[in-house]
Image (spheres, rainbow, N blue to C red):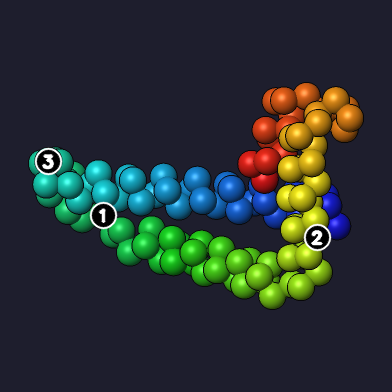
Amino acid sequence: ALPFLQELANFVERCQACALNLVQQLAALYSPLEESYAATFRDVRLSPAFEDLADLLRVLCAVDRAVAASENLAAAWNAYKRLVRRARLDPAAWDVDEPKLAKFERL
């Protein structure tokens, strides 16, 4: 299950990066400071970009609901956080160095 959850976390992280990038690009286009928008993008249909963003957000919401609905996953996640806190108190006993531990804490 752990490889699947890591793959899922990577997928979600990539989706968030793509959504952020798209929103930032659209915001730049619609900015009042961007005078070239009217001339350059007048005939460009941006509705597919908004529809794809909606689809992406829909997928992220479905993943969020599935993860939140799993009681086993919630219990395992709490146990994992407790374990990382213990490792933080005595990294040598757990044979883990600070950079690795910091990576595990960000999960």
What amino acid is found at the position of numbered circle 3 in the picture?
A: Leu
Q: Tell which circle, 1 or 2, labels the residue nearer the N-terminal end.
A: 1
Q: Quadrant of residue 61?
A: bottom right
| Observer-nearest of 75 and 34 | 75
Q: Is residue 19 above or below residue 89?
A: below
Q: Quadrant of residue 50?
A: bottom left
- Is any part of residue 60 visible from this angle? yes
- The picture places residue 39, in percent across and down from the top left corner, at 12, 45
Q: Residues within 10 Å of mark 2 (few under 14, many from 20)?
A: few
- The picture places residue 76, in percent across and down from the top left corner, at 80, 60
Q: Tell which circle, 3 or 2, labels the residue nearer the N-terminal end.
A: 3
Q: Residues within 10 Å of mark 1 (few under 14, many from 20)?
A: few
| Observer-nearest of 80 and 53 | 80
- Alpha carbon distance from label 1 to label 3: 19 Å
- The picture places residue 105, in percent across and down from the top left corner, at 68, 41
- Per the rendering, the mark at residue 44 is 1
- Alpha carbon distance from label 1 to label 2: 48 Å
Are the two marked residues, 3 and 2, in contact with CB atoms closer than 8 angstroms? no
| Observer-nearest of 78 and 61 | 78
Circle 3 residue: 33
Give the mark toward the camera: 1 or 2: 2
Circle 2 residue: 76
Q: Quadrant of residue 84?
A: top right
- The picture places residue 83, in percent across and down from the top left corner, at 80, 46
What residue do we see at 87% from left, 32% from top? 94
What residue do we see at 49% from left, 64% from top? 57
- Per the rendering, the mark at residue 71 is none
- Alpha carbon distance from label 3 to label 2: 49 Å
What residue do we see at 69% from left, 75% from top? 69
